[in-house]
Amino acid sequence: MNAVAMKDAEKMQSSWSYSYNDEIGSLDHVLITPSLKEKLLDATDWHINSVESPLFDYSNKYKDTTWGNNPFYAETPYRSSDHDPAIIALSYEYGETDGQPVVIAAKSGRMEIAYPIRFANAKKGDIASITFSPTPKDMDKVILPQITLSKDGEQTIFFDVNGVESGRYTVTMSLTRVSNEKSTPIEDATMTMEVDVVKRDSLTPEITIHHTMAQAVAVQRVYWACCH
């Protein structure tokens, strides 16, 4: 499915990605599968090349390059080609991974986890919390902060989590309202997701090698040729 053509039909327009001798046309396309159709927000041609003067492109033609420099060239996205790229915007729910865990990279044991609060009645003073299950082994080294909301309404906050070891966890983020010394969980604001915590700064790469039968036979033949 041609994403740009789909959006052109909605907007009742015709996109183009190049111009030559006073004519325009399209060389660049983005194809999507039917499963992405409902997630497509927009698709268009990014006019960073075709509408720019050829003076700014990589060619030295008709330019004074006596000293080996192209005085007009700049290493920017503009006029990096003679036609325009196509770009698209897709919409996913936070944590949407088609049933797979969300991968969170920790650097030196620290990670930042976003909590999108889609609860219109959230109030300044509500307390946001985060928990991991199973409970991390060495809780003395783990910091799971609580954040007090500084404003009303929908918002996104970030938990600065420290000390959680690599592994798979169920992360629950929740909101609690405190009034008259009583804490009341706000069920509509609770969010749960499966995550894989990995080390971003690991010095030990994990390498998995899969051999087909043909590769195994080839290796065996090389061994016999070299060593027998």
Image (spheres, rainbow, N blue to C red):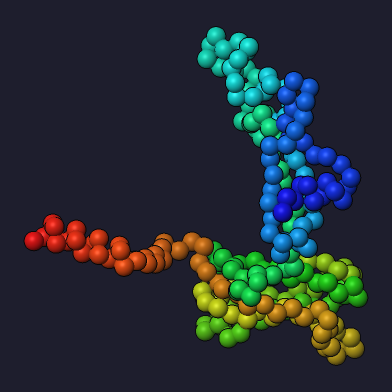
- The C terminus lies in quadrant: bottom left
In the image, taking residue 168 as reference, residue 57 lies left or right, namely right
The image shows residue 123, relative to residue 112, as above or below, that is below
Please tell me in which quadrant of the rendered image residue 207 appears. Answer: bottom left
* Snapshot quadrant of residue 146: bottom right
The percent position of residue 154, horizontal first and vertical second, equals: 86, 69
User: Which quadrant: the N terminus?
Assistant: bottom right
Q: Nearer the viewer, residue 166 or 159?
A: 166
Q: Position of residue 152 (x, y in %)?
A: 90, 70
What residue is rendered at 77% in x and 69% in y? Answer: 116
**Quadrant position of residue 158:** bottom right
> Which residue is pictured at 75% across the width and 68% down the height?
93
Between residues 213 and 177, which one lies in front from this camera angle? 213
Q: Nearer the viewer, residue 226 or 148?
A: 226
Specify whether 208 is left or right of 186: left
Can residue 163 be seen here? The reply is no
Q: Is residue 141 above or below residue 108?
A: below
Residue visible at 59% across and 68% down?
Answer: 104
Q: Return the residue nearer the eye: 136 or 120.
A: 120
Answer yes or no: is residue 1 visible: yes
